[in-house]
Amino acid sequence: MRFIISHIRQTLLVLFVILFIFTGEKPSIAYKIDPISDGLITGKFELAPAMKDFELKEGEHASVTFMVRNLTGKELDLAIYTAHVIGSQNTFNPWLETNEPTWITPEIDRIKLKNLNKLSFNINIEVPKDARQGTILKWFTCRPYRRKRRRKSVSLNPYQDSLL
């Protein structure tokens, strides 16, 4: 009897893991950070379709706050940016809209980064009370996008290369 119960538990666990892998919630925010030559950055932020349940009627306003912090929890100076969002076409669509469709392009000025690995963006979406009943929708955290570097071809026999 114990064997049957443990076997059922293991089967359910495996099914749950498989179900989570295929239907698990994807990251809600995708963005890239493009480092500029002098170490400053600008960010492009894109809201993924996981937010499609959030509706904003045409003409309604919402604000989006971008807060830059490193992963140790210490907030960087001058790193808070608030973008204005206006609804269009009766729904919010899955995308935030500012000046450009589907993209928010805040420039985070004069933030010098020592280490791109230790940077994350928290994005707070807040809808004013006169537009919607709720105020704070959700917090999202994501990490910087980094380009993959192509490795040079490496010989299997470095000793032979040194003889050449």
Image: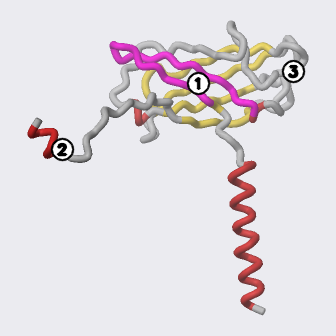
Q: In the drawing, does residue 43 fall left or right of residue 131?
A: left
- Which label lies toward us, 2 or 1? 2
Among numbered discs 3 and 2, the one appearing first in the sequence: 3
Query: Mark 2 — residue?
Result: 158
Chief secondary structure of the magenta portion? strand
Residue at mark 2 to residue at mark 1: CA–CA distance: 48 Å
* Up-down relation of residue 139 to residue 129 (above or below): below
Q: Is residue 48 magenta?
A: yes
Query: Quick one: SS at disc 2?
Result: helix
Query: Quick one: SS at disc 1?
Result: strand
Find residue 91 and name its label.
3
Which region is colored magenta?
A: 30-49
* Up-down relation of residue 104 to residue 68 (above or below): above
Amino acid carrying label 2: it is Pro
Q: Are marks 3 and 1 in contact (CB under 8 Å)?
A: no
Query: Quick one: SS at disc 3?
Result: loop
Quadrant the C terminus occupies: top left
Relative image position of residue 43 (x, y in whole percent) = 53, 19
The residue that appears at 80% across and 30% down in the rendered structure is 52
Among numbered discs 2 and 1, the one appearing first in the sequence: 1
Residue at mark 3 to residue at mark 1: CA–CA distance: 22 Å
Q: In the drawing, does residue 120 fall left or right of residue 163?
A: right
Residue at mark 3 to residue at mark 2: CA–CA distance: 61 Å
The residue that appears at 45% across and 32% down in the rendered structure is 119
Query: Mark 1 — residue?
Result: 66
Q: In the drawing, does residue 162 fall left or right of residue 7?
A: left
Dot 2, crowdedness within 10 Å: few (<14), some or many (≥20)?
few
Residue lying at the far left in this picture: please name it. Answer: 163
The residue that appears at 37% across and 25% down in the rendered structure is 113
The residue that appears at 49% across and 16% down in the rendered structure is 42
Which residue is more in the foreground, 151 or 1?
151
